[in-house]
Image: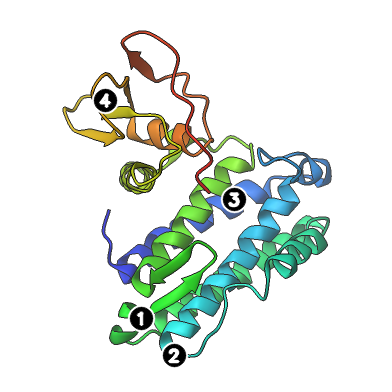
């Protein structure tokens, strides 16, 4: 998958369209039903995705103008906004999602080339602005799965699954609370090493399923472990 933020914008558009199609099929009861995220309904997930788009607009504005614009006013404000919007009717959710997505696209289009190299502060730390479009794509694809409405990791575009896996593995490799493991994609000899590979279990499967398991979106039922045994237990990633 390309790392060019302008080219990735098309991937965000496609992922958002798939998300809206899924959400558009909910009735009131389905919208209020539980998502895969503890304590959140599907309405919570959809509201979060709309406010997340606005948060990325804030970061793009900071990169473009040089002003200190936070992604969210505060963690408490972020939570309050999600809670306030979760119980809205479906039409309001869909309109909010579309409008927020449009604002994100407009913010990307407004970025001069030099602004993509600016550093911005996110809740997860400093990021180069060029990484923000990927961040939005990741949010849409992963939280689409969290809706528990038929969109699964196996439905992720292949390039997305590979990039997510590499990102997660690289992040986990730098932590001390992660069990050692060697990850291998199906049908390849390419391996990602986390921790000391000596004696570590080798976990094999499709890239998207490996990534989903590492971030807690899959139990890893289709993955295999060599030597035979239980899958390691990854820590919480995001």
Query: For mark 1, what is the residue?
Result: 118
User: Is disc 2 placed on a helix, strand or loop?
Assistant: loop
180 in relation to 87, above or below:
above
Q: CA distance from mark 3 to mark 1?
A: 34 Å
x then y, percent, for residue 222: 42, 19
| Label 1, residues with CA under 10 Å away: few <14, some 14-19, many ≥20 | some
- Specify the label residue 21 is tagged with: 3
Q: Are marks 1 and 2 in contact (CB under 8 Å)?
A: yes
- In the figure, 6 relative to 165: above or below? below
Decide: is 200 above or below 235.
above
Q: CA distance from mark 1 to mark 2?
A: 8 Å
Image position of 228 with respect to 51: above or below: above
Q: Are marks 4 and 3 in contact (CB under 8 Å)?
A: no
- Neighbor class of circle 3 (other Cα within 10 Å; few <14, some 14-19, many 20+) is few
Circle on res. 140: none
Q: Nearer the viewer, mark 3 or mark 2?
A: 2
Instruction: Check disc 4 and report the residue beneath it.
Output: 186
The answer to whether mark 2 and mark 4 are in CB contact below 8 A is no
Q: Tag 4 or tag 2, which sits nearer the N-term? A: 2
Q: Residue at (35%, 63%) from the top-left corner? A: 8
Q: Residue at coordinates 76% horizontally, 43% vertically from top-left?
A: 39
């Amino acid at each position: 998958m390309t790392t060019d933020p302008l080219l990735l914008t098309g991937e965000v558009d496609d992922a958002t369209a798939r998300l809206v199609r899924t959400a558009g099929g909910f009735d009131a009861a389905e919208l209020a039903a539980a998502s895969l995220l503890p304590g959140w309904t599907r309405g919570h997930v959809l509201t979060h995705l709309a406010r997340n788009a606005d948060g990325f607009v804030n970061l793009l504005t900071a990169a473009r103008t040089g002003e200190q614009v936070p992604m969210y006013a505060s963690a408490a404000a972020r939570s309050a906004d999600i809670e306030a919007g979760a119980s809205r009717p479906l039409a309001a959710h869909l309109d909010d999602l579309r409008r927020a997505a449009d604002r994100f696209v407009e913010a990307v289009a407004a970025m001069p080339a030099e602004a993509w190299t600016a550093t911005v502060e996110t809740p997860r730390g400093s990021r180069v602005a060029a990484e923000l479009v990927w961040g939005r794509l990741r949010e849409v694809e992963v939280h689409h799965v969290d809706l528990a409405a038929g969109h699964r990791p196996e439905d992720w575009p292949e390039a997305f699954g590979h990039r997510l896996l590499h990102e997660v593995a690289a992040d986990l490799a730098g932590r001390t609370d992660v069990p050692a493991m060697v990850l291998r994609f199906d049908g390849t000899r390419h391996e990602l090493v986390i921790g000391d590979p000596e004696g570590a279990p080798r976990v094999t499967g499709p890239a998207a399923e490996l990534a989903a398991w590492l971030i807690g979106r899959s139990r890893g039922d289709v993955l295999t472990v060599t030597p035979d045994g239980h899958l390691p237990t990854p820590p919480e990633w995001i």
